[in-house]
């Protein structure tokens, strides 16, 4: 987890406007992902419009959880996999619907690689598999 001066500034603005505690801020493709503490989601969502207009960026808000399966569910939202299990440092996401599986993978496996990168910042995993 590397914070730049810009992301620290984004975190400060976000916390001042919303009152939510931020665990991390990740900038990707001109969008900002804020990972907020679990109990602060409602606060963060209330100030979402104001933050987007202030920063002139699309904002994504994810709730952090100490439970890896719940954290991955938060990252995957609005997709709802059938089952998630974590064994031997491998996280397996089971999905029956092929369209949903495609949305989890993303174009050229882009979204799944990004999810794996974010999850590795907080949990000791080797790989995420979608079956």
Image (spheres, rainbow, N blue to C red):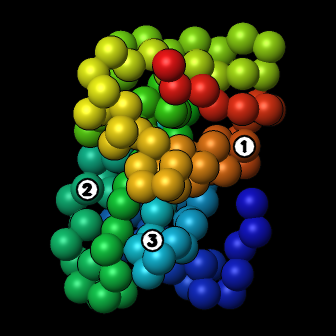
Q: Earlier in the sequence, mark 3 or mark 1?
A: 3
Q: Is residue 77 visible?
A: no
- Residue that appears at 78% across and 22% down: 89
- Camera-side residue: 112 or 107? 107
- Residue that appears at 57% across and 12% down: 85
- Residue that appears at 63% across and 43% down: 116
Tell me the residue that label 2 is attached to: 45
Report which quarter residue 128 is drawn in: top right
Q: Are discs 2 and 3 less than 8 Å apart at CB?
A: no
Percent of width and height locating residue 9: 56, 84
Q: Are discs 3 and 1 less than 8 Å apart at CB?
A: no
Percent of width and height locating residue 3: 71, 73
Tell me the residue that label 1 is attached to: 120
Q: Nearer the viewer, mark 2 or mark 3?
A: 3
- How far, Cα to Cα, is label 2 from label 1? 25 Å
Residue 32 image label: 3
- How far, Cα to Cα, is label 3 from label 1? 18 Å
Q: Is residue 73 above or below residue 89?
A: below
Q: Nearer the viewer, mark 2 or mark 1?
A: 1
- Within 10 Å of the Cα at label 1, are there few (<14), some (14-19), or many (20+) other Cα atoms? some
Q: Is residue 109 left or right of residue 4?
A: left
Say which element carries label 3.
strand
Q: Are discs 2 and 1 less than 8 Å apart at CB?
A: no
């Amino acid at each position: 987890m590397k914070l730049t001066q810009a992301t620290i500034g984004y975190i400060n603005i976000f916390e001042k406007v919303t009152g939510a505690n931020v665990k991390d801020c990740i900038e990707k493709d001109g969008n900002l992902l804020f990972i907020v503490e679990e109990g602060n989601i409602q606060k963060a969502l209330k100030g979402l419009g104001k933050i987007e207009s202030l920063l002139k960026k699309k904002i994504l808000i994810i709730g952090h959880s100490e439970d890896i399966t719940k954290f991955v569910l938060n990252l995957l939202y609005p997709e709802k996999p059938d089952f998630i299990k974590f064994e031997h440092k491998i996280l397996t996401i089971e999905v029956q619907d092929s369209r949903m599986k495609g949305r989890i993978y993303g174009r050229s496996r882009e979204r799944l690689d990004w999810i794996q990168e974010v999850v590795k910042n907080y949990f000791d995993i080797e790989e995420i598999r979608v079956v």
